[in-house]
Image (spheres, helix red, strand yellow):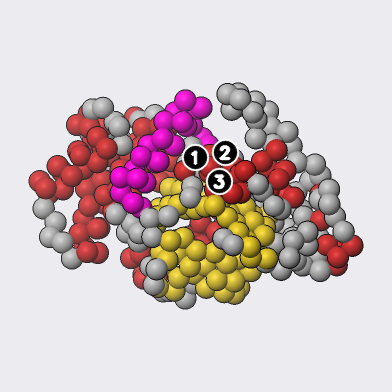
């Protein structure tokens, strides 16, 4: 069974310039203990997708079609109180700016104990402070923070960005969610800390068998952690397949361009070769295939009609070059 099943999802923002469709008929799933990397340029709808799953869309957004089944429950039609109940314990979302995820006026220990308490409530376990404290210390060790007792007494502003992100990962482990959604979890960190946090997520994925949806603009980051990769362009799925398959033999011209822009060698922070053309206007998106104005292989049909999903073995691609 899938932990997350997104079917034909449409999400729209109302803006002063008109309706902006940030997610357009998107379908995919995340299986038990599977990690799926969601990749695309800035503005492709990745964060909107994450927020849709945990029901944290801003007030000017609305679900305009389709469904999101999270652990067997339909998210788009939940009441706010039901949504609060699943948030954290069923799907836990890690944000790019980790400081916003913690309460600034509560000590780390208080916040981590609250996480255990929430889980106990959800799973019907009895909450015992001493037992919970031991569990918290153990999880802080699990996320490779050397002095758990010291960190527990601190307030969020007394921690470094890397430490905060680790504390939040510890919080996620304490809540034992079915699905961990991480939205650019390492983008705000410097390069060495980035690599450490990615390695940690990878270790924990193996150790805990959690399902993960990793959102990133950096396809090489996704490759490090993901079993499968979904490439999005302008709110749409353009390619989905095994991480190996997509990286080694991308099919969609946009996926090809993304992979060609990965810097070679060890210079991970070397400037990327940008993909030609500019990102689409999302209020008046291009007709036909949304990528056609930037596509080196564009054909007449691409300008006229939206491509349908072509399924080849375990690969999905939306492009007239196939099928
Ligand atoms: N609160 C908002 N109001 C209006 N438009 C938004 C809002 N948030 C995001 N968008 C628009 O939705 C599209 C997708 O954005 P986003 O999901 O943040 O993409 P990504 O995370 O891939 O960078 C973009 O065109 C963005 O400008
Ligand atoms: Mg984003």
**Given this view, does label 2 or label 3 mark the residue nearer the observer?**
3
Q: Residue, x 48% and y 37% (percent of image)?
A: 186
The reply to whether callout 1 and callout 2 are in contact (CB within 8 Å) is yes
* Residue 191: x %, y % from top left: 51, 27
Q: Is residue 298 left or right of residue 207?
A: right
> In which quarter of the view is residue 320 placed?
bottom right
In terms of depth relative to the viewer, which is nearer, 182 or 311?
A: 311
The answer to whether the beta carbon of the residue marked 1 is less than 8 Å from any atom of ligand 2 is no
Which residue in the protein does label 3 denote?
Answer: 244
Mark 2: which secondary structure?
Answer: helix
Quarter holding the N terminus is bottom left
Mark 1: which secondary structure?
Answer: helix
Which residue in the protein does label 2 denote?
Answer: 220
Mark 1 to mark 3 CA distance (whole Å): 10 Å
In terms of depth relative to the viewer, which is nearer, 35 or 67?
A: 35
**93 vs 10: above or below:** above
Mark 2 to mark 3 CA distance (whole Å): 11 Å
Residue 16 lies in magenta, yes or no? no
Mark 1 to mark 2 CA distance (whole Å): 6 Å
Magenta stretch, main secondary structure, is helix
* Residue 143: x %, y % from top left: 31, 36
The reply to whether callout 1 and callout 3 are in contact (CB within 8 Å) is no
* Residue 5: x %, y % from top left: 48, 67
Residue 195 lies in magenta, yes or no? yes
Please give the label number shown on residue 296.
none
Q: Where are the magenta residues, as a range?
A: 187-210
Q: Residue, x 22% and y 64% (percent of image)?
A: 123
Q: Residue, x 33% and y 65% (percent of image)?
A: 85
- Decide which of tag 2 and tag 3 comes sooner along the chain: 2
In terms of depth relative to the viewer, which is nearer, 32 or 124?
A: 32
Q: Is residue 34 left or right of residue 64?
A: left
Please give the label number shown on residue 224.
1
């Amino acid at each position: 069974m899938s932990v997350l099943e997104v079917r034909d999802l449409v999400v729209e923002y109302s803006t002063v310039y008109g309706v902006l469709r940030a997610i357009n008929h998107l379908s995919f799933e995340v299986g038990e203990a599977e990690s799926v990397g969601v990749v695309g340029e800035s503005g492709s709808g990745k964060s909107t997708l994450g927020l849709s799953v945990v029901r944290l869309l801003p007030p000017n957004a609305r679900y305009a079609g389709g469904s999101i089944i999270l652990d067997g429950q339909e998210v788009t039609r939940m009441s706010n109180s039901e949504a609060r109940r699943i948030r954290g314990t069923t799907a836990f979302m890690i944000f790019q700016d980790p400081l916003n995820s913690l309460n600034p006026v509560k000590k780390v220990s208080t916040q981590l104990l609250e996480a255990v308490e929430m889980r106990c409530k959800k799973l019907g376990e009895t909450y015992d402070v001493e037992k919970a404290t031991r569990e918290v210390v153990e999880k802080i060790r699990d996320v490779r923070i050397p002095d758990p007792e010291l960190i527990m007494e601190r307030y969020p502003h007394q921690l470094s960005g890397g430490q905060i992100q680790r504390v939040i990962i510890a919080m996620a482990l304490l809540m034992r969610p079915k699905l961990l959604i991480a939205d650019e979890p390492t983008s705000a960190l410097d390069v060495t800390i980035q690599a450490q946090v990615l390695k940690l997520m990878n270790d924990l994925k193996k150790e805990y068998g959690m399902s993960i949806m990793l959102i990133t603009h950096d396809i090489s980051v996704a490759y490090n952690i993901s079993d499968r990769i979904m490439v999005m362009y302008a709110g749409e799925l353009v390619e989905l397949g095994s991480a190996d398959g997509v990286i080694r033999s991308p099919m969609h011209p946009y996926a090809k361009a993304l992979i060609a822009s990965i810097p070679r060698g060890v210079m991970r922070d070397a400037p990327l070769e940008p993909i030609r053309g500019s990102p689409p206007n999302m209020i008046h998106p291009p007709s036909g295939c949304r990528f056609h104005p930037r596509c080196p292989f564009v054909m007449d049909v691409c300008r006229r009609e939206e491509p349908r999903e072509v399924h080849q073995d375990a690969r999905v691609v939306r492009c007239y070059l196939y099928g």
